Image (cartoon, rainbow, N blue to C red):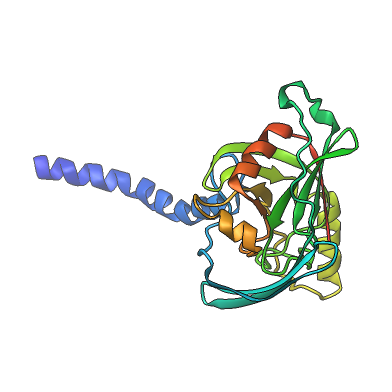
Amino acid sequence: MKRKYTFKVCSFLRPFVFLIACSLPGISGWAQVKPKTGNSNDPQALPRPRNIKVLEEHKEKDGTVIRTIQYDQGDQRIKETQIVRNNLNLHVPINPDTMNMDQVLLVVSKSRYVVDVFYRNKMIRSYKAVFGPKPMENKMMAGDRCTPEGWFTIRSKNPNSKYDKFMLLSYPDDTSIVRFNKLKDNGYIPKSAKIGGDVGIHGIWKGGDDMIEKGVCWTDGCVAIKNKDVEELFTYVSVGTRVWIKK
């Protein structure tokens, strides 16, 4: 009797097991396309750069450093030239507890490798920054590892990021979507391309500040600064802070 009863129960459950099994691909697909918020998970899981070499470096009369570096990341060998301006020691005394966050503006200059912080139209900080391996190119689609250009805002802040602190940007916004669709229509990117997302400003793994100092552009398109800098910047910004990213 026990075996017969067990068989009946199993037979009764078969339709439900079948429905659950059929629905799993749909559930899995939903989980993959559900947009990330940047609050709990980091968007990047890239191999760390290795075999970093400074191939050439010289300083201009105004203190600007022109540097060519080479490094390996995964199975790629990357070579890039950077221009580093001599304005990275700016430190205007200010108390973040008394700041009006609505009057903070971040200006990210990809050609200068910096994040400049303005408060009430006055620059108060300038942090050295790095980007993806093609910093001078505007983002076109997911996977191109380029940093998008234009006006954005900080959408959320994660104080417990794998990269110290993470500030998610509002990419893609309406302007980005219009541009992306035009690139598709004009054949610059495949019809199957996705626009991408999870672009933000963050620090680096513990002990990795040297990557920032050398100008190694290792990210997937995010803006990376030193950990001590991202911890300070984190106190100056809020959700809604404006960010201008330019060449």
Q: Residue 81, how many percent across, how many down?
A: 73, 73
Position of 225 compared to 116: left or right?
Answer: left
Q: What is the tally of numbered marks visible in this picture?
A: 0
Q: In this view, does 225 lie to the left or right of 117?
A: left
| 201 w.r.t. 96: above or below | below
Furthest residue in direction left, as rendered: 1
Residue lying farthest front?
61
Q: Quadrant of the C terminus?
A: bottom right
Quadrant assignment, res 5: top left
Decide if residue 150 is in sight here. Answer: yes
Where residue 171 appears, as percent x and y from the top left, is: 75, 50
Residue 219 appears in the rendering: no
Q: In which quadrant of the rendered image does the N terminus lie?
A: top left
- Which residue is at 68% across, 52% downward? 199
Name the one closer to the observer, 158 or 85: 85
Judging depth in this view, the residue of 215 and 172 nearest the camera is: 215
Q: Residue at x 60, y 53 (%)?
A: 33
Residue that protrudes farthest toward the top in the picture: 98
Q: Which residue is drawn at 58% across and 78% down?
A: 77
On the image, the x and y values in percent for residue 17 come to 35, 49
Residue lying farthest right? 121
**Front in this rendered view, residue 224 or 170:** 224
Q: In this view, does 100 lie to the left or right of 211?
A: right
Front one among 224 and 194: 224
Residue at (67, 42) in percent of width and height: 167
The image quarter in which residue 214 lies = bottom right
